[in-house]
Image (cartoon, rainbow, N blue to C red):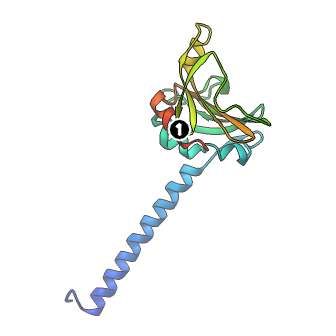
């Protein structure tokens, strides 16, 4: 069968269509796995998730890519919980690496963070902690990076465990914060 003959073209077209179908199915499966958010208890409201979604955290933080466990609503904050890389066993949620998003409404939010325990620097539209100013704040600073963003009526704070995201990765999360 010559390469330009109608049966060869039909066979080539069918082969190409089959390859595209397999590729599309694989892409859909990867996208579904990436966007899958397991929850326990009440679901996190979309108003919180829109600020920083689990897929953004997984793409940005190297350790978070394969360790996402679930989203949990904790005292009005949305917490993305990750399992430690070295442990497959079930652990206490309070001890697992996490990213926590909290939104507070304020009639006139400040233009920058007013927390004097830390030094802040601007990354994109958000502010990020980069140094503890007191000895009492140092242990918290060593375990988490805080991101802060305000608009006309709300302040969004995101706490990112350093066991999950490096400071450089937290800076990239700050740029993605909405």
Q: Position of residue 111 (x, y in %)?
A: 66, 33
Q: Position of residue 20 (x, y in %)?
A: 41, 71
| Residue pictured at 50% horizontal, 30% vertical | 165
Query: Would residue 5 be found to the left or right of residue 146 on screen?
Result: left
Q: Is residue 50 above or below residue 123?
A: below
Query: Would residue 130 be found to the left or right of residue 76 on screen?
Result: left
Residue pushed farthest bottom?
A: 6
| Residue pictured at 78% horizontal, 41% vertical | 42
Q: Which residue is mark 1?
A: 173
Q: Position of residue 128 (x, y in %)?
A: 55, 29
Residue pushed farthest left?
A: 2
Classify mark 1: residues with Cα within 10 Å, few (<14), some (14-19) or many (20+). Answer: many
Query: Would residue 16 be found to the left or right of residue 60 on screen?
Result: left
> Between residues 144 and 74, which one lies in front from this camera angle?
144
Residue pushed farthest right?
A: 107
| Residue pictured at 63% horizontal, 30% vertical | 112
Q: Secondary structure at mark 1?
A: helix
Q: Is residue 135 above or below residue 152?
A: above
Query: Would residue 34 be found to the left or right of residue 113 on screen?
Result: left
């Amino acid at each position: 069968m010559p390469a330009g003959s109608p049966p060869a073209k039909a066979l080539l077209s069918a082969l190409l269509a089959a390859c595209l179908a397999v590729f599309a199915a694989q892409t859909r499966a990867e996208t579904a796995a990436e966007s899958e958010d397991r929850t326990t208890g009440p679901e996190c409201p979309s108003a919180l998730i829109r600020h920083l979604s689990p897929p953004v955290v997984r793409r940005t933080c190297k350790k978070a890519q394969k360790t996402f466990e679930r989203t949990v609503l904790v005292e009005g904050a949305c917490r993305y919980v990750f399992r430690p890389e070295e442990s497959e066993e079930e652990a206490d949620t309070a001890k697992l690496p996490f990213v926590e998003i909290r939104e507070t409404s304020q009639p006139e939010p400040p233009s920058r963070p007013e927390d004097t325990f830390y030094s802040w620097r601007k990354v994109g539209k958000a502010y990020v902690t980069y140094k503890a100013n007191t000895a009492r704040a140092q242990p918290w600073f060593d375990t988490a990076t805080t991101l802060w963003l305000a608009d006309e009526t709300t302040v969004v704070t995101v706490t990112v465990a350093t066991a999950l995201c490096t400071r450089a990765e937290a800076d990239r999360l700050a740029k993605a914060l909405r």
